[in-house]
Amino acid sequence: MRLADSKYADQVIESIDYNFGVFYFLDDIIVSEMHKGITFNWKCAEQVIADAKRILGEDCRPHYISNRINEYYTVSQDWLKFFNNRYFLKSFSVITPHPSGMMNLIFERMFYRRKIFQVTSLHDAFEHIEKIQTKSV
């Protein structure tokens, strides 16, 4: 399910349709829905990071939900660039119904330094974030 078709659509502050995918910016959460067949790399990530800082604030550390509704590819080792630039996420959740998404996830786990939560739906991803936020209060 796309975020725009979900009960969470009314929480979107701003959405941006890049040439590589649609990103939804909510209060403290970013949801991505990549376009079919693209390769998501550091150059793409830099655009999203710049917009996240503009929308959510310069020091934002959002929760990130990768809603993998389409098959696409990632440059997994680019996570190292993300960390080397001192960017951090509060949590990283992946919704992946496609076999290629599972392969991306396996490689991302090799380079992403924190836990990646695999969930089955947007609802599960938002519930997971809610549990994290409840624990930190």
Image (spheres, helix red, strand yellow):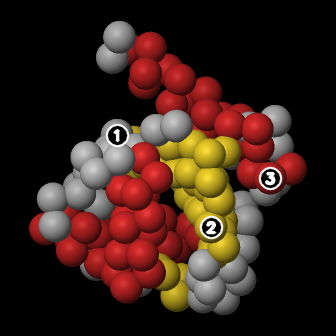
Image position of 106 with respect to 137: above or below? below
Q: Residue at x 25, y 67 (%)?
A: 82
Residue that carries the numbered disc 3 in the rendered image: 4
Mark 3 vs mark 1: which is more N-terminal?
Answer: 3
Q: Residue at x 68, y 79 (%)?
A: 35
On the image, the x and y values in percent for residue 117 come to 47, 44
Relative to residue 91, is residue 126 drawn left or right? right
Residue type, label 3: Ala
On the image, the x and y values in percent for residue 75 come to 39, 83
- Measured Cα–Cα span from mark 3 to mark 1: 23 Å
The numbered dot on residue 16 is 2
Question: Within 10 angstroms of label 2, few (less than 14), some, or many (20 or more) residues?
Answer: few
The numbered dot on residue 19 is none
Residue type, label 2: Ile
Mark 2 vs mark 3: which is more N-terminal?
Answer: 3
Residue type, label 1: Lys
**Callout 1–callout 2 Cβ contact below 8 Å:** no
Name the one closer to the observer, 129 or 21.
Answer: 21
The numbered dot on residue 90 is 1
Q: Residue at x 60, y 78 (%)?
A: 18
Image position of 30 with respect to 50: above or below? above
Regarding mark 3 in the picture, which secondary structure is present there?
helix
